[in-house]
Amino acid sequence: MIHRLVLFLSTAAFAAGGETFRFDAKTGPGGRDGSCHGYLFDETKETIRVVDREKPATTEGQTLGDAFASIGAFAGCSGGVPTPDGKPAGLIVSELKQISPAETGPQGGGALLLRKGRLSLENAATLKPGEGAAIAQGLQCGPMLVEDGKPAAGLDTRFFARHCVIVSSGNGQWAILYVPSATMDGLARMLADKATFPKFQVSRALSLGNGLSSALWIARSESALPLYLKEVNPVRSGIAILPKVK
C-alpha cells in the first residue's frame, strides 16, 4: 500500500537541481511493464556524496530518506552491499574518509568514484591497493551492467528483484534509477537497447544493489512531499546528489 501511494506522488517534476522522470520498461516476469523512476543530473552542476550509516535505522529511527533530507540533497538512492552482519563490504569513501577498502578480485563488481571533481564508473579489478587516498567519494557495488554502450555478459537471467542503478552518458550526463522488477541481464539489455531509457544513450551502467533494500528518494518543492520509494529492509549506505560547490 505504501509502495502504491508513493507511486501516486511520482508524476514528472523538476527537483531543486536536476530532473525527476519516469518511464515504462518491459523488464518484469513474462515481459511485463514496470514503472521506472529516476533523477537526471549534470556533473558540472551537481555531485555525489556517499552516505554511510554504521547502524541503519528501521521503522523507529532515521530512514535513508531522512538522511538525504538532513544534508540538503536533491536526490539519493540506496547503494552498496554490506555483509550479513551489517559491516561494510568493498570500497566505501565518504568526504575523503575511507570507511572500507576496495575488493579488487575478479568478482569485485564495479565502483562509482569521484576524483578531482569528476565522476566515473570503473571495474573494481582496476582499483589499486591504497587508491582510496585519491578518492573523494567512492562506493563499490556491482556488477557493471553496461560498458561502452553494450550489455555486460554473464549476468543472471532468472532472479527478478528491485534494483537501484546509476547510468552515465560518458559526457557528463548521469541518472540514478529505481527499477521495480528485473533480472540483472534484462536490466542491462534494457539500458543498452538505445530505445527504452528516455534521457540519453547509456555508455556505462552500474548496479548499486537489489532486493528489498532498494530505495529512491527525490526532493520536490517545499509544499510537496518527496518522492520516496522506500526501502523495506534496513539500508547502511547510499548515494546523495547535491549541488556542486565551485
Image (spheres, rainbow, N blue to C red):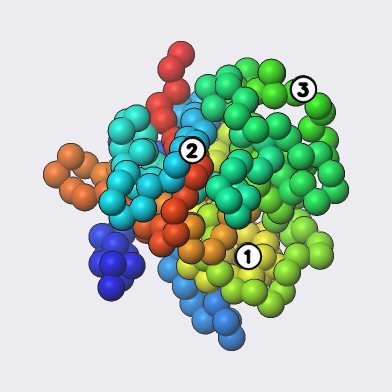
In terms of depth relative to the viewer, which is nearer, 189 or 63? 63
Q: Secondary structure at mark 2?
A: loop
**x and y, in percent, of residue 67 in the image:** 36, 38
Tell me whether the residue at label 1 lies in contact with that at label 2, contact meaning CB atoms closer than 8 angstroms: no
Q: Is residue 62 above or below residue 230?
A: above
Residue 85 x/y as whole percent? 58, 51
Q: CA distance from mark 3 to mark 1?
A: 32 Å
Residue that badge 2 annotates: 54
31 and 111: which one is in front? 111
Badge 1 amino acid: Leu
- Amino acid at circle 2: Glu
- Where's residue 140, x and y in %? 66, 41
Between discs 3 and 2, the one toward the N terminus: 2
| Number of numbered discs overlaid on the protein picture | 3
In the picture, measured across the screen, residue 27 lies left or right of residue 106, that is left
Query: At numbered mark 3, what does the secondary structure look like: helix, strand or loop?
Result: loop
Q: Which residue, as the protein is rendered here, is positioned at the far front? A: 85
The residue under label 1 is: 187
The residue sitting at 54% across, 41% down in the picture is 174
Q: Amino acid at mark 3?
A: Gly
Q: Is residue 191 above or below residue 63?
A: below
| Vertical placement of residue 1 versus 52, above or below | below
Residue depicted at 57% across the width and 82% down the height: 29
Can the viewer see residue 130 in this picture?
yes
Closer to us: mark 1 or mark 2? 2
Q: Which mark is residue 130?
A: 3
- Quadrant containing the N terminus in the rendered view: bottom left
Q: Quadrant of residue 127?
A: top right
Mark-to-mark CA distance, 3 and 2: 22 Å
User: Is disc 1 placed on a helix, strand or loop?
Assistant: helix
